[in-house]
Amino acid sequence: MWKRFSSNIGAMIGVVLLLAVILIAIFAPLLFSHTPWQMVQRPFLTPFTMDGLPLGTDTLGRDVASQLAYGARVSLLVGLVSTLVALLIGVPLGALAGFYGNWVDEGAMRFTEFFQTIPNFALAIVLVAIFEPTLISITIAIAIVSWPPVARLVRAEVMSVRKREFVDAARLAGLSRPRILMTQVLPNTVSPIIVMASLMVATAILLESSLSFLGLGDPNAMSWGYMIGAARTVIRSAWWLSFFPGIAIVLTVLALNLIGEGLNDALNPHLSRKGKA
Amino acid sequence: QQEGGRLDIVVQPEPPGLMLGLVQNGPTQLVAGDIYESLLRYNSDLEPQPSLAESWEISDDGLTYTFHLHEGVKWHDGEPFTAADVVFSADVFLRETHARLRASLTYVESITAPDDTTVVFQLKEPFGPFINAFEAGTMPIVPKHIYEGTDYATNEMNATPIGTGPFKFDEWVKGSYIHLVKNEDYYLDGKPYLDEVFYRVIPDAAARAVAFETGEVDVLPGGSVENWDVPRLTEMDGVCSTGAGWEFFAPLSWMWMNNREGPTSDVRFRQAVMYAMDRNFVKDVVWNGFGKVATGPVASSTNFYSDDVTQYDYNPEKAEELLAEMGYDGEAVRILPLPYGETWQRWAEAVRQNLSEVGINAEIDSTDVAGWNEKTSQWDYDLAFTYLYQYGDPALGVSRNYVASQISKGSPWNNVEGYENPELDEKWAAAASMVTPEERAVAYAEIQKEIVDDVPVAWLQELEFPTIYRCDVQDLVTTAIGINDGLRDAWVEE
Amino acid sequence: MSILTTILSRAFKAFVTLLAIAVLNFCLLHAAPGDPAVVLAGEAGAADEQMIEQLRERFGLDQPFHVQLGKYVGSVLTLDLGYSFRQGAPVAQLIAERLPATLLLTLTAFVISLVLGIAFGVAASARVGKASDSLLTTLALLFYATPLYWAALMAVLVFSVWLGWLPGFGYETVGAGYTGFARAFDIAKHLVLPALTLGLFFMAVYMRMTRASMLEVSQLDFVKTAKAKGLSGPAIRRRHILRNAILPVVTLAGLQAGQLVGGAVLTETVFAWPGIGRLMFESLAARDYNTILGVFLVSAAMVILFNIVTDIVYRLVDPRIGAKA
Amino acid sequence: MSALSIEHLSIGLPKGADRAFAVEDISFAIEKGEILCVVGESGSGKSMTANALMGLLPPGVTVKSGRAMFEARDILRLPEAEKQALRGERIAMIFQEPMTALNPLMRIGEQIAEVFAAHDRFSQQERRDKALNLIREVGLPDPEKIIRAYPFQLSGGQRQRAMIAMALALEPKLLIADEPTTALDVTTQAQILKLILDLRERHGMAVMFITHDFGVVAEIADQVIVMREGRVVERGSAASVLTDPQHDYTRRLLDAIPTGKLPPARAPRDVPALEIKGLRKVYRTGGGFFRPVREVRAVDDVSLTVGRGEVLGLVGESGSGKSTLGRTAVRLVTPDGGQVLVGGTDLAALSEEELRRQRHKVQMVFQDPYASLNPRQRIMGALTDGPITKGVPKAQAQARAKELLEIVGLGADAASRFPHEFSGGQRQRIGIARALAMDPELIIADEAVSALDVSIQAQVLDLLRDLRERFDLSILFITHDLRVAAQLCDRIAVMQKGKLVEIGTVHDIFLNPQQDYTRQLLAAVPGADWAKAGAA
Ligand SMILES: Nc1ncnc2c1ncn2[C@@H]1O[C@H](COP(=O)(O)OP(=O)(O)OP(=O)(O)O)[C@@H](O)[C@H]1O
Ligand SMILES: Nc1ncnc2c1ncn2[C@@H]1O[C@H](COP(=O)(O)OP(=O)(O)OP(=O)(O)O)[C@@H](O)[C@H]1O
Ligand SMILES: [Mg+2]
Ligand SMILES: [Mg+2]
Ligand code: NI
């Protein structure tokens, strides 16, 4: 599987890009002697004009490069954690609905549908506004609006796996239903979930940046969305302030998408997967 | 001078309503200032000028104010305007709806209309600043024939406001624009000059700048673009700007510091905050050089300002000393920024950085407008940004923030920091009811000297909001209230 | 079951869902810190307790929570969205004023994204493995990865400020007094940038999906049958592959179309588009509960409506549904 | 001149395939009006040869050398446009899978008329009329209705006829049929074969007929070629190949065919292992928004008994309810009425928990060896999960699993491998081992051999016979292949449309069938006469 994955050029570009972003995020404190909030030079310093400040300074004279590196931390963290939380909500719910069917399914799906019916960006805005923007509330809000598709996907997968004969075989072997779900059914649904998760991280990063752009970011955490939001009013006089974080988002999301597609191909040699729920 | 023409002016945010008697926030007044009028206007030295009142007298004891109204004034629906409308507005309508005016009206004994063109305000005791209360935002005159006996808040006519002003309401396309047209029956001959005015709703600051650049709008009232954009716009050909028109309001910004609890209850901590902040940096960088670093509670452009006070220059060492002296233990303090856009956000970030550099553990609490109102009025903050209008007189716009009688939960427009100083309270009260300006000046100078040492709040900056407009627009700002006072005199050069 | 009873039963379910949404939203909003009375008072520049009490009473906020909730649900049941005290107008009217602009924007974006997405998806799948396929898919991926608001800012900068080709914000030229065709043209010009920025993102989604679906369907046995008949490549793609491949795209599109209504907040903000997304955002800041609730309910209704429409479309396209399993 | 002659054809496979060439240096010819049957084991390159002729090789697979002369042209090397013109008009093909070979969203009539459109023939109206005629010609009922029907509204046999109608539309000179009947039940299969023979008579086309079923060959072939691993190992007239095979492989294939020779009857045992009384099961499907509820009486009042140590065969056409009956016996399906007694206990009376504990008594070998093994679980897990749940200590369960793997002929080291590392036949044996691991009293074997190659089929049957002797097992053996049933079973039950129509000893059923339906089934077995002759 790794072989198939690594032979996919796009996916490898994605991996390299993502690794770069992750490394920068991890080593940000080592790479920069100052925090992203420190006012180190005169404001609006153009990129590539001063040593030590390769990407220039922002409206308050803070180092854009350092902001970018610290911003990576927040974006990745929010992306990963919210995806994890969404999986923690969506997978069990979808699995139970798909496996037990009947009223469990009906109930779970009504519940899911209900969340899907509220436009999700609007819901995220309301949630963040209500709980006040902190990294935690933003992450949770993103998770809350992103779990329904997971639940639907897992449900669909579980329903199809549940009908496979090896599940009947396990029942004949006398395994209990929860055990069948855990050991026989769920392991067979992981590949689409992994693929979906990689794409969700990308979407979450975009969502966080959109919230930040609207002023609903955590004011104590530097993020790319914050940078663009803060820079939009000076977009005319200081293009680099919104350009670099914009590119950073594009590349990271691109990387995650490439990886997702690579995984999709690698985990699905027969490309026979249907209906992404 | 020239007849005709059209102006497009940015209004931000979109006003909740245009009935000035019910809502008096900035955007509403900007638009409704063309529709409604009051008895007086004020020039840039804050001297009263005629408006609906042609002339007026104040008795020597300072207790009787008599106004003579213009003849032949008509409401926009054609009904005649009379003294009865004034009495209804001031005594009935606004008493119920207008909290700020209500405070001034406590000094008033009676309001009467001896005839159709005369109104008399009889005061219980002298109140120096009373003459400053006849501005359109403070005392808008509303039509009695429409509102008398109705539920003001839900009166259907609120959607199509009727005033006496130079422009009539025509159309409001929500989210887009408000259209006003010339009042052909205006009582001043030849005025107004403009045919129509469009107030444009553009929610994004960058888009507003673009709108001005591309010629879509002609006037950017103060605060509608971020300060960073101002130099760029004013450098364009044919673009003018002015800082005038804010004398009456003289907005002054500060941070409330919670005097009740936490480190901010210690005066040394509050002084340390003052020393830790590089306020000149903020003025130069965040405000792009606009405005002036504040020295105390009174703005330098208003009448009773005194600079004979302790100066808190940027001095981190001193701040650290003070903190060491009080034994600051690193307890976290929350900064509540004013949710009014990027400038304020950056400002809070700069302050947080300044504070953390002297060892104060500060973090920013983020909220929207509703949350800000809630937190400040519930006293749930450590440091909170705010700015307030001074309304031309310390007794109207300053004292309310420092006297103990104004400590009350539920409103962000009073003594929110919880400062209590009975001695000063008395001095504030005495200064308000002195009759001559000279006496008052002395009293206020003393108050300022004392309060600045106590640092109940961290005074930041006298704000300046330049109005940006195309140079062919003439007489845009003619009073101390600026374009909020209406476009009665404005005209466009061909 | 006949189509009519189907629609009726769907409508009933939808109504129940909407009611549940109304209750949830109501609880959610009231959990938010901030009080509309204080906000309104705050905006007035001065306030005292008397005023705030008055306001609270007027808004009905002085009553216990469950009474407020009960009243709200009651009024929703009678299809009454309530009154916005802040804006001094019935919520239904406020929404009705804004909804057309949002629908215009989102439907245009929707059509653009669907048409372009499917066209490019088909084109890419026909050239699978070739350079032009890689180019198209990479481009789509880029659109997909670009933050919407950033793209919007850049678009305004380039097309409106630098090139001056298109208006950068607003719904129409204010006060130009255009009527009829001239007005339509004027609105169309204003529509281009926001619709494109909103549409391109979704175009990328549809394109990827169409391409994948086309490729998948082209592996199916009946395609081989079609080839064996002697049909040409384009004819096979058009008559056989596309028709089958489009179904999942339709489903997704139905889901998205509804989401667009509430999801255009960013676009509406950047382009000063007077739609309900912005109405919601601004009302949220003012805790204008009734208005937010109204917007939520209306956009949820849109989502449900679009879902029903998709279902019906799906059934029309695919004869298998609607007959036996 | 031959209708088609293939000379030294080699087809290359892409890297990583099981071998370098799908077919290597094969040559053969088909005369006008002749039916050539191509037989051979799975994967021997039959389909690739057919696809190459149509110019429809999958990507990566290419013609390496050789030529295929058709109407004096080498059709392997024509430009794509000319190939396209040939397809459907001069050469037509019928595919194996009738269920999926039609466009699900297009009406049958349209799909047939499309052949004319593809070659620009006739006007709109004429196309429709011709399509109608074709539908009539292939014997589809109610042509006016069928022409407007969608594929899903047709049965498998009907779809296959529609496919044939399409193939015949332009009266091609050559018809290639790639296992056109494998997926169909015996009765339908017989009809289709007859149709092809008829059409050959009437249109005089040459037919290349691919199959792996020697019964079919005996029924229709003029000429036969036998393929193995990409090579032609034997060729000749049908009669000579079937009666006097030259090549070893051909002989092995023929030997492995179940002969229908009846084993000696065993004395019936009267201790019942499984009793089924008045069993009923109705499936209700649909009932969604637009669809009416559809009811299928899958099992309708069936009673039968399987004695201890007995093998009872259950036969019947596809959809007659055999699997449902079997699944009810193990209670994977809950019946709507009637009783199922296993060793005297009524499973229906048990609670879910008790049922779980009683499960091991009856085990099932599933129809589809691919689907019945969890692809992500090692064989050891599959074999020990059940016993461990039952309470057998882990070590003991593992030891037993290894032993069983030896018994079914796989070797103990198979335990550590994953299912996809086995061939179909091997997986089927794993399924049997899994059933045995539970020490059952009764095994339901659902089409346990029908997915297998004849030679592997023979092995599995031997194994079952052996196991039954060793463990005194009772087996309910479900199949649609009467010849297989004859080899293994003591008694045979015949089902039709959910009802039990006949039950009796093998001898009674085969030599003296009482019911019309049973006689029909027997008659429809392809090559029945030939097989009997062979047995004699
Ligand atoms: N698309 C493909 N790519 C690579 N190898 C393939 C492909 N399709 C088939 N093969 C290989 O080509 C060989 C011949 O396959 P073919 O389909 O012709 O067999 P067959 O004789 O038709 O078998 P069956 O009776 O199972 O249909 C096999 O080894 C198979 O693994
Ligand atoms: N889960 C189900 N839901 C609805 N109908 C079903 C279900 N399972 C089987 N059926 C229907 O019940 C009938 C009997 O099916 P069953 O699988 O028992 O047939 P069978 O005799 O085993 O056929 P085959 O030889 O094709 O395996 C068929 O018409 C089938 O379509
Ligand atoms: Mg084949
Ligand atoms: Mg079956
Ligand atoms: Ni595989």
Image (spheres, rainbow, N blue to C red):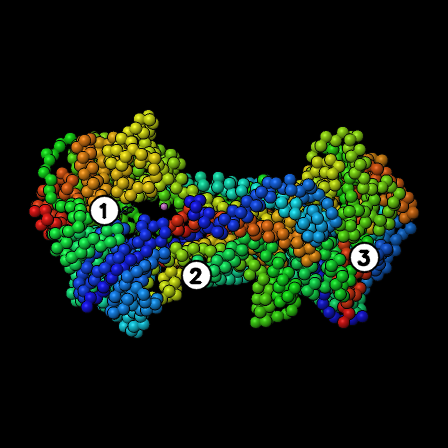
Q: Is residue D1 above or below residue B326?
A: below
For the point 57% across and 68% down, the residue is: C184
**Relative to D267, B195 lies left or right:** right
Q: Quadrant of the C terminus of chain B?
A: bottom right
Residue under label 3: B244
**Relative to D40, A275 lies left or right:** right
Q: Amino acid at mark 3?
A: Ala
Q: What is the spatial separation of the Cα atoms under label 3 and label 1, in whole angstroms?
A: 97 Å
For the point 79% across and 59% down, the residue is: B242
Of A52 and D66, nearer the camera is D66
Of C196 and A14, nearer the camera is A14
Q: Amino acid at mark 1?
A: Asp
Of D265 and B93, nearer the camera is D265
Q: Amino acid at mark 2?
A: Arg
Residue under label 2: C127
Q: Position of residue A233 (x, y in %)?
A: 68, 54
The answer to whether residue B91 of the structure is visible from this angle is no
* Secondary element at tag 2: loop
Residue under label 1: D453
Of C269 and D25, nearer the camera is D25
- Tell me the subunit letter for badge 1: D
Between label 3 and label 2, give the one nearer the viewer.
Answer: 2
